[in-house]
Image (cartoon, rainbow, N blue to C red):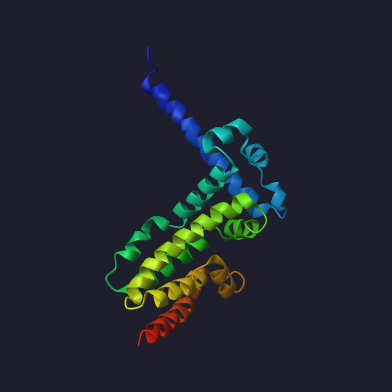
Amino acid sequence: MSPRPYQLGKRQAQVDQARQRVLSASRALLAESDNYTAFTVEAVAKRADVARATVYYQFGSKTGLLEAVCDDLARAGGMGHLDAAFGQGDPVGALEAFVGAFARFWEADRPVLRRLRALAELDPEVATVIRARDERRMQGLEVLSARLVPADQGAAHELARVLHMLTSFEAFNALAAGESRFAEVIPVVMTLASAAVASARARTG
C-alpha cells in the first residue's frame, strides 16, 4: 500500500522547513562571521540544528549550498522581475531598469552579499559561485550594450565591461558611502552609465 497523501505532504513540509532553516543559518553565519573559515557545512548544520547529512542531501555540496543561498538572495531582491528590463523598447530605459533591479538586489541583504564577495577572494568554492553570477550579469549587459551601440560590436563590448563595473555590488557599496540606501545612488550610477553610452556612441561616428 502506498503512503497516504497527507503523510507525503507532511514529509515534504518537513523537508522544506529543514531547507529553509539551513538557508537562514547560512545567511546568519555569513553576516556574523569575521573569519572566512567559519563558513562550513558543519557550522551551518549546527546553526540550523540539522544533521550534516541533511545539508548534503538537500544541497549536494558546499558549492550547491552557496548557489542556493544566492538564489534565496535573488528571490529576496526581486530578481525575478529583471526580464522586464529587457522587454523595454527603449534601450536607455532598459538600462535604467537593469540598474534599478541590481540596486534592489544588492540592497536585499548587504551584510551577506558583502561577505560573500569578500570570501570570493579567499575561498575557491565561493569564487566559483560569485564568478558565475557575475558572468550572467555580464551576458545581460552584452545584450543591452548591443542595443545601445548597434553599429560597433567592439564599442558595445567595451561599454558592457564599463557597465558591468558600474552595476557591481562594489560600485554601489562605494557610492552609497556608509549605510545610505543603494536606491539613492541610482541617479549617480545612471549619470556615469549615460556618459559611458555617449562615449561608446561617439566612437562609432
Residue at the image point whose x is 44% and y is 30% from the top: 12
Relative to 79, does residue 151 appear above or below in the rendering?
below
Q: Quadrant of residue 146?
A: bottom left
| 112 and 36: which is toward the camera | 36
Relative to 11, does residue 108 appear above or below in the rendering?
below
Image location (x, y in percent) of residue 148: 35, 76
Farthest residue to the left: give it: 89
Farthest residue to the top: give it: 1
Task: Tell me: 137 left or right of 42.
Answer: left
Residue at the image point whose x is 64% and y is 60% from the top: 118
Q: For the N terminus, which image quadrant?
A: top left
Task: Tell me: 74 left or right of 201.
Answer: right
Residue at the image point whose x is 56% and y is 73% from the top: 176
Image location (x, y in percent) of residue 163: 46, 72
Residue at the image point whose x is 38% and y is 60% from the top: 82
Specify whether residue 132 is in view: yes
Q: For the C terminus, which image quadrant?
A: bottom left
Label total for image: 0
Image location (x, y in percent) of residue 48: 61, 38
Task: Tell me: 58 left or right of 7.
Answer: right
